[in-house]
Structure formats: C-alpha cells, structure tokens
Amino acid sequence: MRVPFVLFCFMLCRPLLADTVPISVVDLIESACVDCHNADDRIAGLDLQPVVTESIYDHLPVWEKVIRKLRTAQMPPRDAYRPDPQAMAEATQRLEDALEQVSRRHPNPGRVSSFRRMTRFEYGNAIRDLLALNVDVTSLLPADEVSHGFDNITVGDLSPTRLNRYVSAAQQISRLAVGRAPATAGGKTYRVPPDVTQDVHIAGLPIGTRGGILIHHNFPQDGDYEITVRLARDRNEHVEGLKESHQMELLIDDSRVELFTVRPPNGKTDTSGKTDPNDPWQKPTHANIDRHLTLRTSIKSGPHHVGVTFLPKTPSLIETARQPLNVHYNMYRHPRLGPAVFQVSITGPYESKGPGETPSRKQIFVCYPEDESAEDSCAEEIITQLLERATKGPVSEADLAKPMQLYREQCDRNGFEAGIEMAISAILIHPRFLFRIEHEPSEASREQTFALTDLELASRLSFFLWSSLPDDELRSIATQGKLRDEGVLEQQVMRMLSDERSHSLVTNFATQWLYLSNLDSITPDSRLYPDFDDNLRQSFRRETELFVESVFQQDRSVVELLKSDHTFLNERLAQHYGIPHVFGSHFRRVALNPEDRRGGLLRHGSMLTVTSYATRTSPVLRGKWILENLLGTPPPPPPPDVPDLADNVISNKLPVRERLAQHRADPACATCHDLIDPIGFALENYDAVGRWRFTDQGKVVDATGGLPGRDSSIGIDGLEDGLVAHPEMFVETMTEKLLTFAVGRGLNHYDGPVVRRIVRDAKVDDYRFSKLVLGIVQSPPFQMKSSR
C-alpha cells in the first residue's frame, strides 16, 4: 500500500513543523516499509503511515526501533524490496541526527529510585573497604534478583526477612572486625566441589604438590585453632584413589605446619613417630582412615591462607599412556588416581590470647584510650570516621547520637571494645549505608529534571567503577563541591580505573554481561563429554575474566573483545583447546596461530558452554546470546502457542541444522528463527564444551551462517569479520550494558541518542574503554535524574 498524495502534502508543509521527519527517511519508509507496516497489515503491530506525518518527538519509541532495525540490516527483509544501500545509510544517518536534535531540545535523563539498596556483591566490597575485612557474603545474605541482565536494578526494597539477614550479618561482621573473643569456640567448614579433579596442581598451592584446597580464612583472635581434614569417599563410603601411602601437607601462609601420612585400608600398623600400635584407630579402615588428620596449632589473628595438599607421586609412563582423560573424580567413568580432600574444618579459638593486630583493628582503632576518661572522646573519633565512610558523606550530631548511645550502653557493661563493636553493628544497618539515597529538590515538579549533588554523583561513580563506597579522596572532593570543576571528574575517573578496585568491572559487570555467572550451573552430560570437570569450568571463567581485564586495564579498543590474536591459558585449558606447549596451572597470555581457532569472546569455552545444552550445541541459544549481548537486538519472545523443539519427535541423531530446519517448517517459528539460527550456525564447529570439531553425528559440520540482512559467511571467521567490519553496533550494545549497570535501570527510547553520542565521541580514539566510561560518567543519565 502506498500513499504518495498524503506524503506529498506532508512534505509541502514540512517547513512549518518542528521535529519533522527528514525527507530521505520519508522516502525510505514510503518505498520500502509501508507495504507491510500500514493500517491494514500492521506487521509486528506497527503502522508507519501516520508516524512519518507527525512530529518525531511524538513517536520516539517507534523511531528508535526503526533505527535499530535499519542499522542491523534486519529490515527491510532480504526477500523484500531493498533500496540502494547508500541511500539507506544516508537516511539512517539523517534519522539519527534528527533524533539527536530532539534529544537536545527535550532532554530526559530518566528516573532512578531515590532509595537503592546495595547488592550482595556491593555489600561485600563495602565491608572490605570500610573495615579492611573480606567476608563470604554468599553465606550471610540472599542473592539479588536479576533484571535487564544485572542484579543492581531491582534493589529498591528491604523485606523483613532480608532485614533480619542484614542485622545478623552486621553482628557477625562487627565481632570479627573488632576481634572480640566469642563465648564459645566457633568454626567453619570449607568443602571442595565434588567434580574437582585433584590429581593436578592447584593454583596458589606450592609448586610440586597436587590436589587439595586453598582457604582464605579470618582468624578472630590470637590463639589455638583446630584444623580437621576429611577425605573424599565414594558412594560405598570408601576413600577414593587410596591404593598406596600418600603424604598430605598442611600449610599456613605457605609454610608447612604438619605432614600427615595417609595409608590404604587393611595395611600394616604404623608404629613410627607418634603412632601407638595398640590404638585401634591406627589400623586403617575406610571408616577411620582420616581420623588422625587433625592438628591444633597456635595462629595469629587476622586473615591467613590455609592450604591442604598432597605431595605428588610420579606416575609411570605406562600408566600415563593409559589415561586419555584429564578428569578423575567419578568412581564409575573416571576414578581418582589418588586420594582427594573432601572438606576442611577450622574451629577455635581455644585458649584465646587476645585480639592481636589485624588489618581490621588497625583501620578501626585510629585511637585507643589510655584510661576511662578518654574512652568517650576516642569512641566518638572512631565512630565519626567510620560513619562518614559508611554513609558516604559528612555526619551531624544527630547521626552520631544513636551509635554513641549504643556504644555507651555496651561499654558500661562489657568494656570499650564491646562498645565499639556495638556501634559498628549499628553503622552496618544504618539506612545511608545499606541504601544509596538520592534526594529530590522539594520544589521539583513532575516535569523537571535536575542534577545530582556532588556527593550523590561521587556515590554513583564509585559504585559504577568499584561496586563499593567512595574513598576518602573522592568523598573529600565531593564534600567541597569541586567534583564538577574543569578536569576534576575526568581525573577522578582515570584514577579510579587505575585502582585495583576497578577489577569489579570484570568480576561484577562483565561476569553478568557475558553470563559467566551461569557457568556454575552448567554440567554437560558426562557420558557425552567425559573430559569436563570443575577445573575446566573455572578455567573457562578465568580465561574470559583475564581477557576482558586486559582490555579494560590496558585501556585498549573494546573491539578487540571480538577478534584477537591472543588469549589467556593454563595447561588444563590449553589441552582442552588442543594448543601445545602450555604447562602448569597458572594462566599466562598466549599468542595464537590461525590453526588454534581461538581468540575473541565468541571462541571462548565459557561463552560456547553457557549457550549450549547438556547434550548438544544450540544455535538458537548462541544466536540469541549474540543478538542480545553483542548486537543489542534481542528477538521477541516466542508466542505462547509455539512448542519447544521436540527432541522426542525430531530424531536426535540428526545434526542440529537439520533438526532446526524441521522446527522452522512451522511458519510461526520461522519468523524469529530465520533471524536467530544463521548466527548460531556460524559457531557449529564448536561443540557443547567449546572444542573444535569437523563432524557432528558422522556428518561434516555445515557452519554456513551470518549476520541478519547480510550475505552468508562461513564459520566463526566470517562471523567475526562481519562484526568487526561494522563495530558500531557492538560498541553501542556494550555502552548500553555499561550505562544500564552504571545508573541501575533499564534503558529506554530516550537513551538512544545519548548512547550514540558516547559511541561517536569514542570512535575518534578507536573506541578505547576509558572513553566509553568517561562518556557515560559525563552523560545526562549519569549526572542527572528526572522527577517523573
């Protein structure tokens, strides 16, 4: 359907209208779009006829969708009339320029809740920076819900149940930080995941050892602690892999404190050393074989590394040659070659000798009273400095009143340090600690936008780059109102990016963006993929983290995330990928050859595994992942009446491409799958655990695929080249993800021009990471908010 007369009349009146649609865009819509997107057909629920005749401002959501479809070449469809590519590019640019002008005339920074609770991850970092204490927050607080891909979006409330968890956490953390002796000896047990292969060296433990566990434990006081080790057993309660005697080493901070001997059951009684031949426990059985693996030793307070590991036994060449797999943790398919650690328990202190000197106490006790008369003034100094850091700004007498009251009450009963502990507990449940609070001017109307205060901006900045509290320097600048002075904000951004705390951009932002957090829930079928274990799972994660970190920390072009001539490997991962000459458990940067078929994110085992099923690859999951996370064009959800791919109807002996072809025979499925599947097909040379393959189900893999609206390409090389040839979409998508994470809300149509402006400005510097971050920090959505 065409309406040239209406469009002709509209173009005659264009000079009289504001925010009008550019003529080239009108021509494009009239020639290539309205045949489907009209009042009669309304394909995808869209009628563009009235849209082109009215103000752009009145239809911003529609025009942002049009921009996205045109830039990714998803529209017009490949089987429909497509105008000249140059004309389409020109019209798209004109539309972007028009939307940019509308954005400048009608700025809308969006609205974020004025009360936003810290996430569990942020809480752990805040405790680290406030009290110099690393705690396992996963055991203290419940996980946060994910929305728009991140867990810092839906954090506006604090349910009674969650509040109780925060109160309990505050009590435990304050006691540990101050180091006050518990009424009874406490304990904690650390358990090794069951699918960890312990026949190789574990990173962080001494070179020349094998298996075991490395624990980071906070000891509350100087004193004696008992460390107990239990060995792994199979379903029959037999200790696994124990065919001969082994030596097990117990270390504190890399120094050996004990060397145990573990003997196989029914062996000879050991009458050497401390062993009593009349003791029945010294006659090894599977029930008592690890009863002697207990040590009580004196340990100073504070954080220490506790290591438990075995001294290796050199295997014979014949035995090594008979072991084709790297995995040894399952008694049926790949039994352990030697004994393994199941868990380590640490209890104490016994015979406590006092709190000692810990990093936490040094940070808390900036003064210490010489006598009772100096206690209150010293307590006020301590509480003031902690409260300022916790609440992210200056504190008043009213702020100090409650913590000081609680301090005095507890101090009168149990002494100065007990009072400080109580005050810290109160600070850790203070609303301005648990929440990021952004006040709104009382005179703000429903239509107003306003700038954040410098302190609020500092808080946004620190939680964006560090996922934690502002430090003293940033808070001091903000308190003086100088954060927006010329060059100051940029200087602070660059300082914070160079700080080690910016590693949270990898462990928090990138982990969620790239689905690395899903790896722990992925367990491929062990019958089909017998060489998969937790060692490989964690190697997948580490490779991607180090790869992303290298781009972020070295401030390189983010386009390098798509295609690279290097990656980061250890021996386990290199063997899985088939890359020779990489030895040892430590990761290092490895230069790649084309025949290695590794490099950018799309070739990482992490991404390839989390987008597969337990039994096979999934072009649908992989294609959807790329559309959502790299191209920013997520496909619509399937209609409710469309069935899943029926494995029990379509033979699972067919290659996935043929099975999906039968699935797409349903017209209701074809609309979306014609868009998703070709992208996923380009990755079919990688199996469900990221290994390269040439065949699938006995047939040569067909990796023909490609990006929407473009010519088909072959395999990963063609897909990468297609993405790199048009990097704007990837950079825009990454910027959208960063902005979503930074401001804590899902993006809307009015954010589109802002994102494109950030990307356009960063293009001058080849899309360096810091330029994207600076663009976000300097943008209206980050520095302002709307009262709407």
Image (spheres, rainbow, N blue to C red):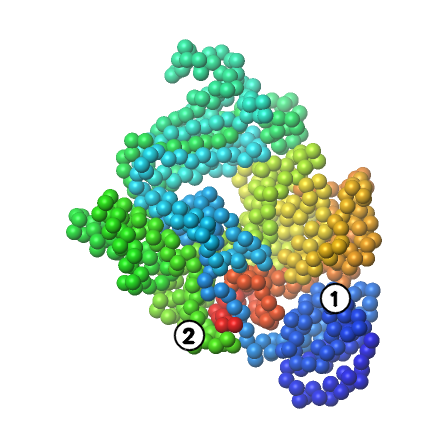
Q: Where is residue 110 in the image (x, y as percent from the top left)?
A: 54, 69
Residue placed farthest to the front in the image?
Answer: 160
Task: Judge the density around disc 2: few (<14), some (14-19), many (≥20) Cα neighbours within 10 Å.
Answer: few
Q: Where is residue 585 in the image (x, y as percent from the top left)?
A: 54, 37
Q: Quadrant of residue 728?
A: bottom right
Mark nearest the camera among 1 and 2 is 2
Classify 124 as above or below 709.
above
| 119 to the left or right of 635 | left
Q: Residue at x 80, y 53 (%)?
A: 664
Classify 236 as above or below 456.
above
- The circle on residue 442 is 2
| 70 to the left or right of 146 | right
The amino acid type found where label 1 is placed reads Ala
Q: Position of residue 459 (x, y in %)?
A: 43, 62
The earlier-in-sequence mark between 1 and 2 is 1
Q: Where is residue 257 in the image (x, y as percent from the top left)?
A: 38, 28
